[in-house]
Amino acid sequence: MIRATTFNRCLRPVRSPRYIHKSSARKMAVPVTVNELPTLSLLYKLKRIAAADDVEPVYAANATFNDKISVIKQDITTLCIDSIVNAANNTLLGGGGVDGAIHRAAGPDLYDECETLNGCATGSAKITDGYELPAKKVIHAVGPIYWSTKREGKHTALLSGCYRRSLELATENGLKSIAFSALSTGVYGYPSGEASEVALDTVRKFLEEGKGNELERIVFCNFLQKDEDAYFKNIPKYFPQTSSAEPNKQPAATSTDANELANKLPDPPAAEPKDPGEPNHKRQKTDTSDDDFVVVERGDVDEAEAASKKD
């Protein structure tokens, strides 16, 4: 059974109590488990993803793959998962955006371990422990700066390298689940549409090669609407919907309870309130005014009810 999500709550990234300002009234984040994340199979069933008539799929439909993939709009620091992929810079010592949020939520021990890694090349990735995060491991992937690498014709290969190396690190370390942030789509300027196609194609090829058989869930975790929209638009091209006659192996999708189906879809963070009064972590090279929030609101249950009644 899927744990019912409490709606209309304001969440923040998990962090150690010693880093919470006493005057802050915000709640600590409630970790989101893998079982609460909707797969592509469920998203198709609920008609959250619609196959476009003018899009020719690049690959054949595969129910097993669709049961492995999730797309969500969520604060990645709240995911209780084997690994999350950080949109890091070459130093691996923290920065703005999701990079800073992950470092803040993990605590100063993450910075200390990253100092021992001697940085990371663009298009590659390195792995550390998750420390105070709900995730067991953090994979730090360094994506390309779009406008400079495109001039050299290297932008696609470098971004694809981030996704492939992250998947390899997950499998090499015996991890069963991995959640990707939208790599390079922030200040690095990679267009969300192009970036989502690179990500989806790289993951699909990795699965087609049989290298991801041990992975039980691959999540594309977006913070901004533009990134989620890009994935929803391009998913049918790389992970098309299976026919209704094809069996679906995902147990959660067999539920006829509309509320449970709707509760599997965590709603997005709606704002990024700032808290200038919150102190910096030990040697943390980030701006604490970038604190991230997730506002989870009641989703549209009607779609789920309609989908359930048809089954």
Image: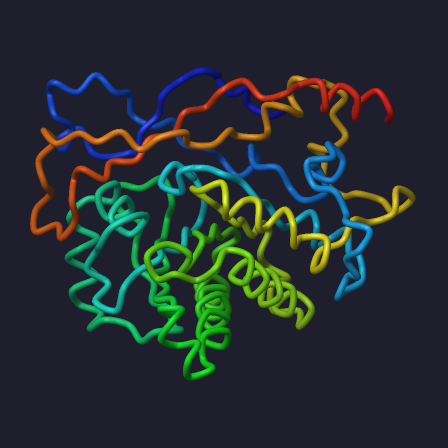
Residue 304 image offset from top left, x and y in percent: 72, 23
Q: Is residue 118 above or below residue 170?
A: below
Q: Is residue 128 above or below residue 247?
A: below
Residue 243 image offset from top left, x and y in percent: 87, 47
Side of 16 where 154 appears, left or right = right
Residue beneath the point at 62% across and 50% down: 69
Residue beneath the point at 21% across and 16% down: 25
Q: Is residue 32 above or below residue 151?
A: above
Badge count: 0
Residue beneath the point at 16% across and 39% down: 288
Side of 11 where 157 appears, left or right = right
Side of 207 where 181 appears, left or right = left
Residue furthest toward the right?
245
Query: Image quadrant for the C terminus?
Result: top right
Residue 287 image offset from top left, x and y in percent: 16, 45
**By what rule are the colours in the image chosen?**
rainbow
**For residue 42, which quarter of the picture?**
top right
Residue beneath the point at 35% across and 75% down: 148
Q: Nearer the viewer, residue 39 or 301?
A: 301
Q: Is residue 211 above or below residue 25?
A: below
Query: Image quadrant for the N terminus?
Result: top right
**For residue 94, which quarter of the picture?**
bottom left
Residue furthest toward the bottom?
152
